[in-house]
């Protein structure tokens, strides 16, 4: 009885800082949601999610070196989950890791950006084609609502909301295509091309949501070829404008 009582008392005590740094899954009686070390999810996944958000938001500059000790201190975890997170993000192409310099934020060169944009345009085109083919009423209704909110945000110059709404539109379009392989590919390439689709001018935002409207009209009409063409054009247009700002090249004219 005494041994069982002691065992019960030990399990009720909060985890020590040392134990927090050694476990990969944390169970705490009163989790501190501001510290990743107290969340009820694998630490390496939590770190990867937070670091991915920071990378996509542009909080780390291209070429910047990410130091494991500093990240571990910032997230309130040990180095092991940080190392696993870095490995996962490197496999996604969001980080570049070398034996000498460790993890660095990759620089998106114009040539590499063009290649990524070309592939993403092809994937988005296939996704839109499938969305027009499947024609799921519930998802189309959701796309209409996202489009309405996006157009309103542009009209009212609520630019900070557009990135999230843009992601919602493309996620819903992928869901309408009902192909999980394509959805996974699309999300991967969306993350890797994030710099090209990040903060945009009011004029670019207006064109982006006009493109979205044209894609959705084709999907609603069930015109597979037109939906695919509009989606691919949209990605090419945004990507080409991004490359033009990087190189000072003339902007590509919109295909008719």
Image: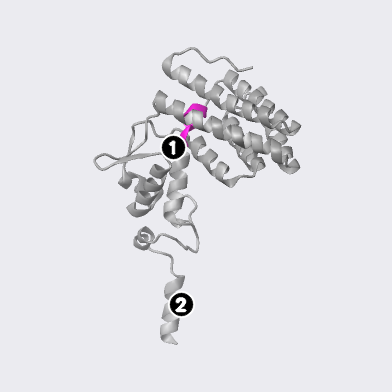
Residue sitting nearer the eye, 219 or 105: 219
Nearer mark to the viewer, of 2 and 1: 1
Quadrant in which the N terminus is drawn: bottom left
Q: Position of residue 73 (x, y in %)?
A: 35, 48
- Residue that mark 2 sits on: 8
* Residue range of the region highlighted in magenta in the rendering: 192-197
Q: CA distance from mark 2 to mark 1?
A: 43 Å
Quadrant of the rendered image containing residue 95 = top left
Can residue 205 be spotted in the picture? yes
> Label 2's element?
helix
Q: Residue furthest top?
A: 250
Q: Which mark is residue 55?
A: 1
Q: Position of residue 159 (x, y in %)?
A: 59, 27
Q: Mark 2 or 1 closer to N-term?
A: 2
Can residue 35 be spotted in the picture? no
In this image, 7 relative to 161: left or right? left
> Label 1's element?
helix
Residue sitting nearer the eye, 200 or 252: 252
């Amino acid at each position: 009885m005494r041994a069982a009582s002691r065992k019960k008392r030990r399990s009720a005590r909060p985890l020590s800082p040392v134990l927090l740094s050694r476990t990969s899954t944390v169970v705490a009686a009163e989790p501190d949601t501001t510290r990743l070390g107290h969340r009820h999810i694998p630490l390496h996944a939590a770190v990867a999610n937070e670091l991915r958000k920071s990378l996509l938001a542009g909080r780390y500059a291209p070429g910047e070196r990410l130091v494991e000790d500093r990240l571990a201190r910032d997230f309130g975890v040990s180095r092991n989950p940080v190392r696993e997170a870095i490995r996962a993000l490197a496999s996604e192409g969001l980080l570049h890791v070398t034996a000498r310099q460790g993890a660095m934020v990759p620089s998106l060169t114009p040539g590499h950006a063009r290649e990524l944009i070309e592939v993403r345009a092809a994937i988005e085109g296939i996704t839109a084609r499938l969305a027009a083919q499947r024609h799921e009423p519930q998802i189309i209704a959701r796309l209409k609502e996202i489009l309405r909110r996006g157009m309103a945000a542009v009209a009212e110059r609520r630019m900070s909301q557009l990135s999230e709404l843009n992601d919602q539109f493309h996620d819903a379009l992928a869901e309408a295509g009902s192909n999980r392989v394509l959805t996974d590919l699309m999300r991967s390439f969306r993350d890797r091309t994030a710099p090209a689709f990040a903060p945009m001018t009011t004029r670019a935002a207006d064109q982006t949501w006009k493109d979205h409207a044209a894609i959705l009209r084709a999907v609603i009409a069930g015109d597979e070829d037109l939906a695919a063409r509009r989606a691919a054009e949209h990605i090419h247009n945004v990507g080409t404008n991004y490359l033009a700002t990087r190189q000072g090249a003339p902007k590509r004219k919109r295909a008719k």
